[in-house]
Image (cartoon, rainbow, N blue to C red):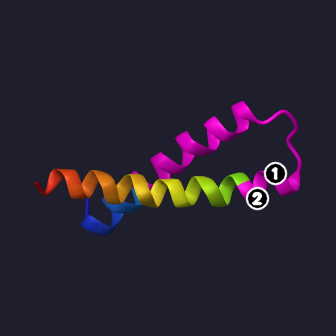
Amino acid sequence: MGRAAAVTAELLAWWLVLMAAWLVFISTVDALEGLVGAGCALLGAFAACAARRAMSER
């Protein structure tokens, strides 16, 4: 698997985990909540990937 595919797979995995957590913690699921959750989960996924990469380079 190439580097780009590995990074994409890691980002997708983090996004799925964080999006699932978002859906568990909200009380009502509508379109706006889903979009906000997807955006926040994507930002969190980028941060998690960057933090893991920073710690592995130590």
20 on left or right of 34 = left
Instruction: Give the spatial CA distance, label 2 vs label 1.
Output: 6 Å
Q: Is residue 6 above or below residue 28?
A: below
| Residue 22 within the segment the image draws in magenta | yes
Can you say which quadrant of the picture contains the N terminus? bottom left
| Residues tagged 2 and 1 counted as in contact (Cβ below 8 A) | yes
Q: What's the residue at 62%, 56% (across, down)?
A: 40
**Label 2 residue SS:** helix
Neighbours of disc 2 within 10 Å: few (<14), some (14-19), many (20+)? few
As drawn, which residue projects farthest toward the left? 58
Neighbours of disc 1 within 10 Å: few (<14), some (14-19), many (20+)? some
Q: What's the residue at 72%, 38% (across, down)?
A: 23
List the residue tagged with mark 2. 35
| Residue 30 within the segment the image draws in magenta | yes
In the rendered image, which quarter is residue 31 located in? bottom right
User: Label 1 sits on what residue type?
Assistant: Glu
Quick one: 40 or 14, which is closer to the camera?
Answer: 40
41 on left or right of 3 = right
| Residue 47 percent coordinates (x, y) | 42, 58
User: Label 2 sits on what residue type?
Assistant: Leu
Can you say which quadrant of the picture contains the C terminus? bottom left
List the residue tagged with mark 1. 33
Q: What's the residue at 20%, 51% (across, down)?
A: 55
25 on left or right of 4 = right
| Residue 21 percent coordinates (x, y) | 62, 36
Mark drawn on residue 45:
none
Q: Main secondary structure of the magenta part?
A: helix
Which portion, as a residue range, is magenta? 10-36
| Residue 7 percent coordinates (x, y) | 34, 61
